[in-house]
Image: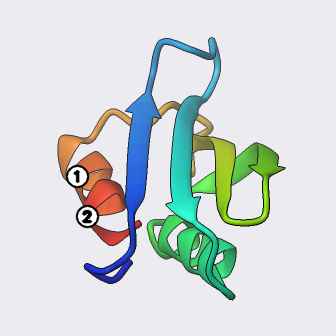
């Protein structure tokens, strides 16, 4: 995302037994959810579940994701990339 957006990305491998949980809290902006999904798909990750909460000005979306082998994300470079690009 762009520097002027207020966004927080939290990656958690302990919250779910079979997937990595990625929580994104952000100011609402047209197309922002598409940008986040694009980052995940660019990394060849599969979204197994998604939850969204929206109050008009802010949103929170939680994704459960796995890699191509169906495993949690363990690669620190991948996790860092997701946090820097989301």
**In-image side of 10 versus 17 (left or right):** left
Does dot 2 land on a helix, a strand or a loop? helix
User: Residue at label 2?
Assistant: 84
Q: Nearer the viewer, residue 74 or 3?
A: 3
Q: Quadrant of the N terminus?
A: bottom left
Q: Work out whether 81 lies above or below 14.
A: below
Q: Nearer the viewer, residue 8 or 42?
A: 8
Disc 2 crowd, CA 10 A, few/some/many (<14, 14-19, 20+): few
Q: Quadrant of the C terminus?
A: bottom left
Q: Nearer the viewer, residue 34 or 74?
A: 34
User: Residue at label 1?
Assistant: 80
User: Would residue 41 be seen by someone viewing this image from the given angle?
Assistant: yes
User: Would residue 67 be seen by someone viewing this image from the given angle?
Assistant: no
Q: What x and y, as percent, mark residue 79? A: 30, 47
**In-image side of 64 versus 22 (left or right):** right
Q: Residue at x 53, y 50 (%)?
A: 24
Q: Residue at x 56, y 33 (%)?
A: 21
Q: Work out whether 83 lies above or below 42.
A: above
The reply to whether the C-beta atoms of the residues labelled 2 and 1 are less than 8 Å apart is yes
């Amino acid at each position: 995302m762009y520097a002027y957006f207020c966004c927080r990305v939290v990656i958690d491998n302990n919250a779910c037994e079979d997937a990595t949980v990625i929580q994104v809290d952000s100011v609402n902006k047209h197309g922002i959810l598409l940008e986040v999904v694009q980052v995940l798909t660019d990394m060849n990750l599969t979204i197994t579940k998604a939850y969204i909460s929206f109050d008009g000005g802010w949103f929170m979306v939680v994704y459960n994701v796995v890699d191509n082998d169906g495993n949690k994300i363990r690669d620190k470079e991948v996790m860092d990339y997701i946090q820097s690009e989301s």
